Image: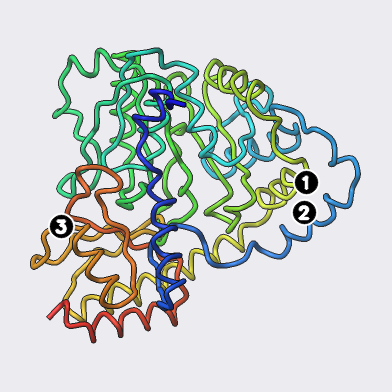
């Protein structure tokens, strides 16, 4: 049977392909140290797990959940936004629960993108932005994120005609993979452009709580006028080591939230209520667990950055997210060749930047989701390999 055109045009999912390659090497006896997929290696904090256990034992959580999410969960998101960002949200009209933010990001283009409609996608960027637009039948214009602009979009380089034709724009700060952080001035410019050109802004804020310096990342909704043009996606995955729990939300303009909720009621049946109650526990906590998680990443970053510089590869110290976005050494053709040679010689894996877009061709991404002792082992292998001499 012939596949649908939408599947034919869809590239294999980057991280699924990486999983296959790494698992094959492990089956062959390689002691792999992977800085690849951004999945926290630490456990979910105990108090969240304990709340989940209690909720699972309550038979009232065993039925179908509400489509939009428990009111108490949406209220917890609302309270957290007010406390963290100073943003007021109506739990009934401006918040919808998500089975992880990826699910909402993937479904949102179906709400507004018709065949041939144009969406603006960051390059490099999380692959789901691109593939979700393609699945919805849309067309994509990539927005280059460059080192010289601190990985912020330079809208002066985007043709006016492109902005006039665009219907949707994805942004993501703190950024995956570049670790770029949005300034208030940048977000103000985004609001102005969105209002002028009638563009919906879909901001992926999954890494807002993974900051390694004193300055806390902004919510796009903090900017005056943003709530009238935007939907923002959030998640407990990275902040509380809850990637497998699939617990997230979308917040923003009532119309956009209603549209996404309508898509979801026709596709899924909501988050398991016990997971939502665990999510409430996380959101209502005093954030000491998140502080401890940030400190772990900060220490790992420092060990890795200093160790790589010692062997001759100078990489930037990320200020947010748990990713280091590094240009490959000059003696290598590109990130793909570099990643392959390093893996073959040492069993240490870095994600080739080309998997996130053309702008990532000469980069690799290193995730700090590796224990400190394994980082030191990786550094030792890299030094002994002679690849950096």
> Looking at the image, is mark 3 or mark 2 earlier in the sequence?
2
Position above or below: 131 against 307: above
Q: Give the camera-side residue of 388 and 312.
A: 388
**Label pair 3/2, CB-CB below 8 angstroms:** no
The vertical placement of 161 against 42, above or below, is above
Residue 319 lies, with reference to residue 67, above or below; the image says below
Label 1 neighbour load within 10 Å: few <14, some 14-19, many 20+: many
How far is disc 3 from disc 2 in space, using C-alphas? 45 Å
Question: Could you classify mark 2 by the number of other residues whose Cα lies within 10 Å: few (under 14), some (14-19), or many (20 or more)?
Answer: many
Labelled disc at residue 26: none
Q: Residue at x 47, y 75 (%)?
A: 371
CA gap, disc 1 to disc 3? 46 Å
Q: Quadrant of residue 289?
A: bottom right
Q: Which residue is label 2 attached to?
A: 52
Question: Considering depth in this image, is 19 or 128 the residue closer to the camera?
Answer: 19
In the image, taking residue 290 as reference, residue 54 lies left or right, namely right
**CB contact under 8 Å: marks 1 and 2:** yes
Residue under circle 1?
274
| Residue 10 x, y percent position in the rendering | 37, 33
Q: SS of the residue at dot 2?
A: helix
- Location of residue 159 in the rendering, given as x and y in whole percent from the top left corner: 15, 21
- Mark in the foreground, 3 or 2: 3
> Which residue position is annotated with label 3?
334
Task: State left or right for residue 164 relative to residue 255.
Answer: left
Image depth: mark 1 or mark 3 in front? 3
Using a 10 Å C-alpha cutoff, classify the residue at mark 3 as few (fewer than 14 neighbours), some (14 to 19) or many (20 or more).
Answer: many
């Amino acid at each position: 049977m012939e596949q649908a055109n939408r599947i034919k045009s869809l590239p294999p999912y980057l991280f699924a392909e990486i999983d296959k390659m790494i698992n094959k090497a492990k089956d062959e006896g390689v002691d792999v140290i992977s800085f690849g997929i951004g999945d926290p290696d630490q456990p979910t904090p105990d108090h969240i797990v304990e709340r989940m256990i209690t909720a699972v034992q309550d038979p009232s959580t065993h039925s179908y959940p509400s489509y939009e999410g428990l009111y108490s969960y949406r209220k917890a998101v609302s309270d957290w936004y007010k406390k963290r960002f100073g943003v007021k949200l109506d739990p009934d009209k401006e918040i919808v629960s998500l089975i992880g933010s990826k699910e909402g990001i993937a479904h949102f283009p179906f709400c507004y993108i018709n065949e041939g409609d144009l969406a603006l996608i960051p390059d490099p960027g999380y692959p789901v932005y691109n593939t979700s637009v393609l699945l919805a039948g849309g067309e994509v214009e990539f927005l280059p994120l460059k080192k010289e602009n601190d990985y912020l979009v330079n809208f002066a380089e985007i043709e006016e005609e492109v902005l006039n034709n665009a219907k949707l724009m994805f942004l993501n700060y703190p950024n995956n993979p570049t670790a770029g952080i949005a300034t208030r001035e940048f977000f103000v410019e985004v609001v102005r452009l969105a209002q002028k050109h009638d563009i919906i802004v879909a901001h992926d804020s999954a890494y807002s709580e993974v900051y390694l310096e004193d300055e806390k990342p902004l919510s796009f909704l903090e900017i005056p006028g943003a709530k009238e043009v935007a939907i923002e996606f959030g998640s407990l995955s990275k902040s509380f080591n809850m990637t497998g729990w699939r617990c997230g939300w979308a917040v923003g303009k009532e119309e956009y939230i209603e549209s996404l909720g309508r898509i979801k009621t026709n596709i899924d049946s909501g988050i398991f209520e016990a997971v939502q109650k665990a999510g409430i526990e996380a959101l209502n906590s005093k954030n000491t667990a998140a502080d401890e998680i940030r400190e772990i990443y900060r220490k790992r970053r420092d060990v890795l950055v200093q160790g790589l510089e010692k062997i001759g590869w100078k990489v930037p110290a990320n200020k947010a997210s748990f990713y280091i976005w590094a240009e490959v050494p000059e003696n290598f053709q590109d990130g793909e060749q570099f990643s392959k040679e390093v893996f073959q010689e040492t069993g240490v894996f870095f994600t080739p930047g080309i998997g996130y877009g053309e702008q990532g061709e000469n980069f690799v991404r290193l995730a700090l989701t590796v224990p400190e002792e394994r980082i030191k082992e990786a550094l030792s292998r890299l030094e002994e390999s002679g690849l950096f001499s």
